[in-house]
Amino acid sequence: MLNILIFIFGLLIGSFLNVVIYRLPAGKSIVFPRSQCSQCQSKLGAKDLIPVFSYLLLGGRCRYCNSRFSLQYPVVEFLTGLLFLLLYQQYSLGSQFLVYSFLLALLIPASVIDFKQQIIPNQINYFGIGAGLIFSVLFNHISLFSSLLGIVAAGGVLLLLAVVSGGMGMGDVKFLAMIGSFLGPRLALYSLFVGSLLGSVVLLPLMIAGIKDRKDRIPFGPLITLGAVMVILGGEQIIDLYLNLFRFN
Ligand SMILES: [Zn+2]
């Protein structure tokens, strides 16, 4: 029963994250006004805003003007629900669930915005760094020192990479610093490594096939997020697996 409630809670948070994804880069308030169709401006009622289900029931179209809604809406909602459910199964209800689900609720909109617009908004990064520090004091899942070190070390490593290689922006640096503030230096750096490894698995064939250019900007936000999700959900097993990949014997 609690599984279903957690999943529904995740769907509702996902629905809010869609609002963040749509309004934050446009500089609009994420609280007011009520949601409306971007084509016909009709105000959307409660029955239009049930996560995933409204989209499926209406065939992904506006009830009033029949224009198509982006598939992004149900995907973000479903993904958030699913990840919250997986977090709950891994950690049950407690401070870790709270801290990690809060972090996910920052990583998801940042990744989608980064993927669509090649930018990670400062509002998310700064808010997240502050929240990570406060959570370390409130919940002590990591020490405040570890949280600070996470910001400096994870952000520092990426800053160095950005200076040396280019192809990465300050948004990415602050983004990893935010993950460091929640996870501490070790897990934040593993998130980066796992994300980069996944990135090269996906991107190398695309580069070889000539679909992607070396100069194309790599979407680090979604890749690092994928790394962080795997590190949070997989824990030590993912890290062992990763280390084994690079051990020759
Ligand atoms: Zn409409």
Image (tube, rainbow, N blue to C red):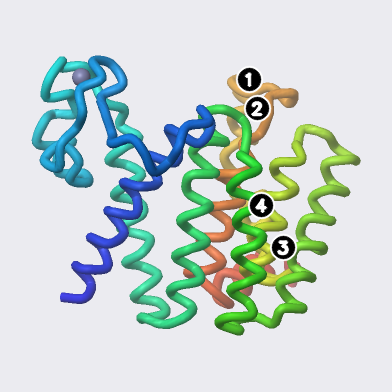
Marking on residue 126: 4
Would residue 200 be seen by someone viewing this image from the given angle?
A: no
Task: Check disc 4 and give the amino acid type.
Answer: Tyr
Which residue, given by chain and number where applicable, does mark 1 sit on? 210
Which residue, given by chain and number where applicable, does mark 2 sit on? 207
Disc 4 + disc 2, Cβ < 8 Å? no
Marking on residue 189: 3
Q: Which is in the foreground here, disc 3 or disc 2?
A: 3
Q: Is residue 221 above or below residue 226?
A: above
Q: Earlier in the sequence, mark 3 or mark 4?
A: 4
Q: Where in the figure is residue 23, as x and y percent of width and height?
A: 45, 33
Q: Who's the residue at 25% across and 20% down the image? A: 41
Q: CA distance from mark 3 to mark 2?
A: 25 Å
Q: Is residue 187 left or right of residue 41?
A: right
Q: Quadrant of the C terminus?
A: bottom right
Instruction: Identify the element where label 1 is drawn.
Output: loop
Instruction: Identify the element where label 2 is drawn.
Output: helix
Disc 2 + disc 1, Cβ < 8 Å? yes
Q: CA distance from mark 2 to mark 1?
A: 5 Å
Q: Where in the figure is residue 152, as x and y percent of width and height?
A: 81, 62
